[in-house]
Image: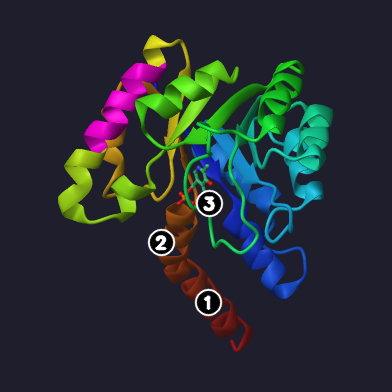
Amino acid sequence: MMRLSINVDHVATLRNARGGHFPCPVEAAKLCMEAGADGITVHLREDRRHIRDRDVERIAAEVQTRLNLEMAATEEMVAICTRLAPPACCIVPEKRAELTTEGGLNVATPDPFLRQAIARIAARGTEVSLFIEPEPAAVEAAHALGAQAVELHTGTYAEGAVARRNAELARIAAAARHAKALGLACHAGHGLSYDTIAPIAGLPEIIEVSIGHFLISTAVFEGLGVAVRRMGGLIRAARG
Ligand code: PXP
């Protein structure tokens, strides 16, 4: 079984562009679950550029799901995560100016707070995963830091040169085997799409993928025609 966790951050990005309540990431999370998703991921960023505290609280309270709170290892975020105690938490590096998470955590020479953050979150019963590069040394470092899971960064595989895909897939496969051998739950994510999911889904050690940008973007194209036809119908009906 491979779980599909949907990242609904970009529904909040659209909402925030207009400053109102629509589209609502909580409603999007419910729709994803109705459509067969296994979990919902939200990245609560320090600058709250998309998901806001209230969104996380509402998803935790209102949506029957495996909520995965993606966050930086800061005192503020650890306090939120330990208060809400979601089923899962993925710790990522976070730079204020980045457009999206740009790479795995530095687990080789980690911030001293990282170990403490993992221990405090795990003590509340939340599974802690570390977002890392698909390298054996990073997997070992995550294990040594006390994480229960790793999320392997698939960005280079999914978004890099097509000619490098097989080599990158082999790196992900080796890291996934290593994680499983160490007893870590192995997840993967970043940049995955209809075109790139199958080889990742073919790796039995990976038990969860997290997908956001492609699905929310594709929903625009798969849904825009439906919405335009409905609006056209309402206009024609109003005009008799
Ligand atoms: N996993 C992590 C750790 C991420 O930071 C992101 C992006 O928010 C994803 C998965 C999902 O990536 P994408 O939006 O490209 O599918």
Identify the residue shown where x is 28% and y is 46%: 196
Q: Element at badge 2?
A: helix
Q: Is residue 4 magenta?
A: no
Structural distance between the alpha carbons of marks 3 and 1: 41 Å
- Judged from this view, the residue extending furthest toward the left is 163
Percent across and percent down for residue 212 are 50, 50
Q: Quick one: label 1, few (<14), some, or many (20+) residues within 10 Å?
A: few
Question: What's under tag 1, amino acid-wise?
Answer: Gly
Percent across and percent down for residue 58 are 78, 42
Q: Quick one: label 3, few (<14), some, or many (20+) residues within 10 Å?
A: some
Question: What's under tag 2, amino acid-wise?
Answer: Glu
Q: Element at badge 3?
A: loop
Residue bearing the label numbered 2? 222
Q: Which numbered dot is residue 101?
A: 3
Q: Nearer the viewer, residue 128 or 105?
A: 105
Question: What's under tag 3, amino acid-wise?
Answer: Thr
Q: Quadrant of the C terminus?
A: bottom right
Q: Is residue 197 left or right of residue 86?
A: left
Q: Is mark 3 within 8 Å of ligand 1?
A: yes
16 shown above or below 58: below
User: Which mark's residue is nearer the viewer, 2 or 3?
Assistant: 3
Percent across and percent down for residue 65 are 63, 30
Q: Is residue 207 left or right of residue 231?
A: left
Identify the residue shown where x is 70% and y is 19%: 122
Structural distance between the alpha carbons of marks 2 and 3: 26 Å
Q: Which numbered dot is residue 233?
A: 1
The part of the chain drawn in magenta is 169-179
